[in-house]
Amino acid sequence: MFELTGKVAIVTGAATGLGQAICVAFATQGASVVPTDLPGVSMDATVEKCKAAGAPEVFPQAMNVTDHAAIQATVAAVKDHFGHIDILASNAGMNKPMPAEDVTPESWDAHFAVNIKGGFFLAQAVAPIMKAQGKGRIIFTGSQAGVVARDNQQPYCATKGGIISMARALAYDWAPTGITVNVVAPTFAMTDLARKRLEDPVYGPKMLAMIPVGRFVEPSEVGSAFAFLASEEAAMITGQTLLVDGGWTIW
Ligand SMILES: NC(=O)c1ccc[n+]([C@@H]2O[C@H](COP(=O)([O-])OP(=O)(O)OC[C@H]3O[C@@H](n4cnc5c(N)ncnc54)[C@H](O)[C@@H]3O)[C@@H](O)[C@H]2O)c1
């Protein structure tokens, strides 16, 4: 069940954190993996972990998701190399928390460029290939911050809420083509993105108290949600947001 044997999966923001865990989850289920991250950022650890997890092939690519030409070039390179692209995990993201009064137009634009615009144009680039195949899986990393408010993170929350709406709209348009489009929305995970805040002796326990399950999510648990939505068994699930939040949003 949930096998991905023979599939090819592109993952963005894959050098570390949740992106790395998504790559490993896909590899564990038998997919070949294309980890991508910013030029100059090492993906060696991800490549090694994917190989150890059993990926038939690992094909790392440097790609800044805000660079439209790089998106086109990467998708073309992956198609040339494998002949097909079955899964896109659009995961690259940034978050610079600050009071609303301090947000600059540049910071606002940067959040939108990385967190939502890049994912949209990557989805646009893989869609013709997936349509020709008659199937495909596009999965975005959202956040509980797209569903509930988080402190001092207005642009971040706006991008993550936007991803949910965007995924629904894409899912609707592409449903007849065999492409499903979904969102995995995690609670806090102890990655580079959140570690500094979660290790704060006041902020960390305050956030933990919001999670009924009583712990932060493990990156591998986010990876498992991606693997499920990427599988054949999830063919009837589209336009949905799967909250992997230990119950944060149920109360
Ligand atoms: N960590 C959490 O608590 C948490 C919770 C909910 C959602 N998320 C989301 O999960 C995703 C991954 O976050 P993470 O916690 O693993 O963070 P992370 O900082 O550990 O990893 C993010 C990765 O994205 C890459 N990246 C940044 N800008 C990029 C760009 N322009 N092009 C390509 N790659 C780029 C970084 O180099 C890095 O490898 C993000 O979308 C984030 O919003 C994280």
Image: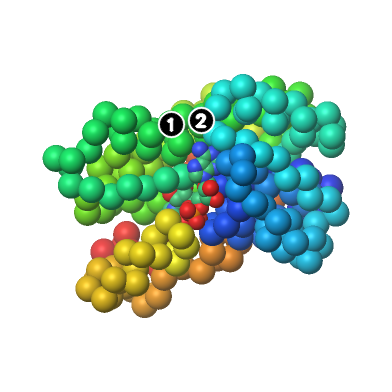
Mark 2 within 8 Å of ligand 1, using the beta carbon? yes
Residue 155 occupies quadrant: top left
Nearest the eye: 12 or 249: 12
Considering every residue shown, the one lying at the far left of the view is 101
Q: Is residue 27 above or below residue 161?
A: below
| Side of 161 relative to 192 (left or right) | left
Q: Which mark is residue 113?
A: 1
Nearest the eye: 180 or 86: 86
Residue type beneath disc 1: Ala
| Side of 221 relative to 169 (left or right) | right
Can residue 233 be spotted in the picture?
Answer: no
Residues at badges 1 and 2 in contact (C-beta under 8 Å)? yes
Residue identified by numbered label 2: 66
Count all numbered tags in the image, as a single digit.
2
Residue at point 44%, 39% (across, down): 115
Nearest the eye: 34 or 7: 34
Residue at point 69%, 36% (across, down): 136
Q: Position of residue 45 (x, y in %)?
A: 68, 60
Q: Position of residue 178 (x, y in %)?
A: 67, 32
| Side of 202 relative to 31 (left or right) | left
Residue at point 58%, 41% (across, down): 38
Q: Position of residue 233 (x, y in %)?
A: 68, 51
- The local crowd at label 1, few if under 14, some if 14 to 19, many if 20 or more residues have their Cα within 10 Å, is some
Mark 1 within 8 Å of ligand 1, using the beta carbon? yes
Residue type beneath disc 2: Thr
Q: Is residue 175 above or below residue 149?
A: above
In the picture, which quadrant includes the C terminus?
A: bottom left
Can residue 43 be spotted in the picture?
Answer: yes
